[in-house]
Amino acid sequence: MAAPASGPEAGTPVPATTPATTGSGDLGAPLYIAWQVTNECNLACLHCIEESGPGKAFPDELSDEQVFSFLEQAMDLEIPYLSFSGGEPMVHPRFFDMVAFVCARNGQLKIETNGHYLGPENCARLKSLGVKAVQVSLDGATRETFNRMRVRGDFDRAVEGVRNLRAAGVPIEINYSPTRFNAHEIGAAVDLAAELGADSFYTGRTMYTGNAVKTWHRLAPTEAQYGEYFEVLHRKTEEYRGRMRVHFHEMGLLEELRYRLHHPAALLIVLPNGLVKLINALPFVCGDLRRQSLGEIWGRFQSAWADPRVAKFVEDLAEDPRKTATLHQWVYL
Amino acid sequence: MKLARYVKFREEKFGGVLFETRSEKVFTLNPTASAVVREIQAGAAERDIPSLLKARFRDDSGAIEREAAAFIAELRQKGLVED
């Protein structure tokens, strides 16, 4: 009755997939849009892949008119799931208007935030608007590691924000980026997330791009650390089964990109200025919402993935993994 | 019966997709399954859906009726619908 999007036929079994594993070729629109609403941020994290920070908003970020035109197109195309990230999405002056717009059209919306603007009043607004979940980055189980990673950040304030979400009844997700100085806290961090009432916990490998290029010597976990890291996560997955979902990606970037070349996900990454990327971990841009409709961009998405420059970049990564340092030098397909 | 709170449905040329956004799982549906979901969204009673589809698809063999009933059971088992 149900099958992967690439080959639906009556009577086949029912494999569940995720947006990341759903073939996009036969779909009339994306299943998921991840929108970085602004590059502005109150923090300046050591590992930030977007190099966000105070005063780092792009000069050409979408205007209010362009923002709401884009959201209207997304809702008209019945895109079931969107996320707002950044930068810090909650510093965008129209943040709550954008949330209200999507939720009023029954879009399922996730907010990805550093948790520093989650006072009781904002959490109550998010609850009343009906967001699907709020994901908070908590890269440490202690004040020391969190504050070291999240420059200008405050562990206590982020944790308080999560507690406020819980009190307001907003579903909570926790995100954790591993480094050589916080990887050992992963078990305690998963426990903390559960204690705070999180529904899900997400982590993977930290990417060599953005701010991490400058700080890699202080950040990069060793392979031995990653080995222990994922071992703990396997245990925690079992420990919390049925109470909190623990999601983690052990796969290295190269393996993932090689898979994506043949199985592009039904996902668009939208940058603050309306450029649309194939995937965050590649520099390739397949559209511009300031000049093209969302439908037109989706129409080009498959052929853009097939561009030989994409495959070449991925294979070059095998020779030189540090090519990810150039992800912000966009290549227009 | 209705789709569960975190489940979204979209029609596609091949049928449709159900997206459970909490677990982020996607289920790709053939035309019969999509027709079942459309009936659910239209407010049809669960017990009436198989016969409605049998009539709509003019299927005298009973195959679609059985397929629809099995799919409804599967939706329940996976928590994709609620009362």
Image (tube, coloured by chain):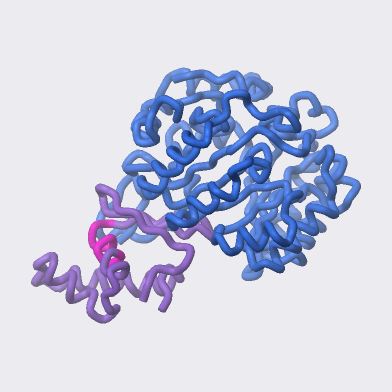
Chain colours: A blue, B purple
Q: Is residue B33 magenta?
A: yes
Magenta residues, dominant SS class: helix
Rendered view: A162 above or below A29: below
Q: Is residue A263 magenta?
A: no
Q: Is residue A277 visible?
A: no
The structure residue drawn at horizontal position 58% and vertical position 64%, both measured from the top left corner, is A128
Q: Which residues are magenta?
A: B30-37
Is A43 on the left or on the right of B13, as rendered?
right
Residue B47: horizontal and vertical position, in percent?
A: 26, 81
The structure residue drawn at horizontal position 43% and vertical position 52%, both measured from the top left corner, is A80
The structure residue drawn at horizontal position 65% and vertical position 52%, both measured from the top left corner, is A135
Rendered view: A311 above or below A18: above
Quadrant of the image for the N terminus of chain A? bottom left
Q: Quadrant of residue A221?
A: top right
Is A82 on the left or on the right of A160, as rendered?
left
Foreground pick, A178 / A162: A162
Q: Quadrant of residue A168?
A: bottom right
Quadrant of the image for the C terminus of chain A? top left
